[in-house]
Amino acid sequence: MTKPLVFITGASAGIGQATARVFSAAGYPLLLVARRLDLIEAMGLPNTVAVAADVRDYDAMVAALKQGEDAFGPVDCLINNAGIARLARLDEQDPAEWRDLIDVNCIGVLNGMHAVAGGMKARRHGTIINVSSIAGRKVYPHHDVYGGTKHFVHAVSEGMRQTMSAHDVRVMVISPGVTKSDIASSITDRNAYEFWSKGRDAMDGGIDAEIVGRTMLFAYELPQSVTMHEMTITPTTQTF
C-alpha cells in the first residue's frame, strides 16, 4: 500500500460507515472496528481489516490495532467515531444510561487515543480525529448527560492536542449538527425523541453522513504541519 492505515471506530453504520467508504475510495487501507462485524463485512471494502470489538474494552482495542498494523503497517489516522445518543433529562433518566453514555462516549474515546498515541509519538507522525457533536459546544433540552460527554470530548482533545503537538501529532475534533444516520435508534426517551425528531424533520433529515466523512478526509490530507483544531458542520438551515 502507498497510503497509510486509517483506524475507524463505530464503523458499522452512520457516520462511521460513510467515512469508511470515503477513505476507502481515496485509496486508504482501513482498520474498521464495531460490535457488529457482519455490517462491516457487508460493505465489501478492499484492503480492510474488520474487527468485532467494543471501544469500552481497552485490551480489545489494542488487539484490534495489532491486527490492522500487522496487515497494513502503522496507523496514521484514528477516527474516534463510536458513540451513542441516550437523550433525556438527567432527573428523568435511568442512571444505567448515564453509565452507557460515559463508557462509550468518554472511555471509548480515551481507549482509542491511548492505544495509538505511543506509536504516533515514536514516529512523530499521525492524526487523531475525535467525533463530537454540536451538543459538545451548545446545551440543548434532553441532552443533559449526552451533552456532557461531548463537552468532555472537546476538553480532553484540547489537552491531548497540547501534549501531542510537541511530537508533531495532530488532534482534531469534528462536531456535526443534525446528520442523516441511525443515531435515533439509541434514543429511548419519548420526549427526547420527539424534540430531536422535530428538529431533524425541519431540516429534511440533516446533512448526509458522507459529507462529514469528506470533511474529515479534507482535514486529514492537509500537510502534517497544519491542524484543523475544530470543525463544526451543520445543515445551512440549522441555527441552533
Image (cartoon, rainbow, N blue to C red):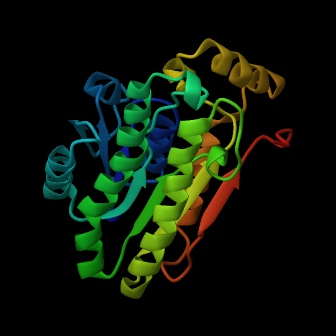
Quarter of the image for residue 121 reads: bottom left
Residue 77 in the image: state x and y as whole percent.
Answer: 38, 61
User: Quick check: can you spot residue 144?
Assistant: yes
Residue 120 in the image: state x and y as whole percent.
Answer: 29, 73
Between residue 80 and residue 93, name the one nearer to us: 93
Tell me what residue is drawn at x 82 percent, y 39 percent. 238
Residue 48 in the image: state x and y as whole percent.
Answer: 28, 43
Q: How many marks are shown on the rendered structure? A: 0
Between residue 15 and residue 173, name the one nearer to us: 173
On screen, residue 184 above or below 83: above
Tell me what residue is drawn at x 25 percent, y 38 percent. 50
Residue 232 in the image: state x and y as whole percent.
Answer: 68, 54
Tell me what residue is drawn at x 38 percent, y 32 percent. 100
Q: Quadrant of the N terminus?
A: bottom left
Q: In which quarter of the image is the C terminus?
A: top right
Tell me what residue is drawn at x 23 percent, y 71 percent. 119
224 left or right of 59?
right
- Outermost residue on the bottom side: it is 166
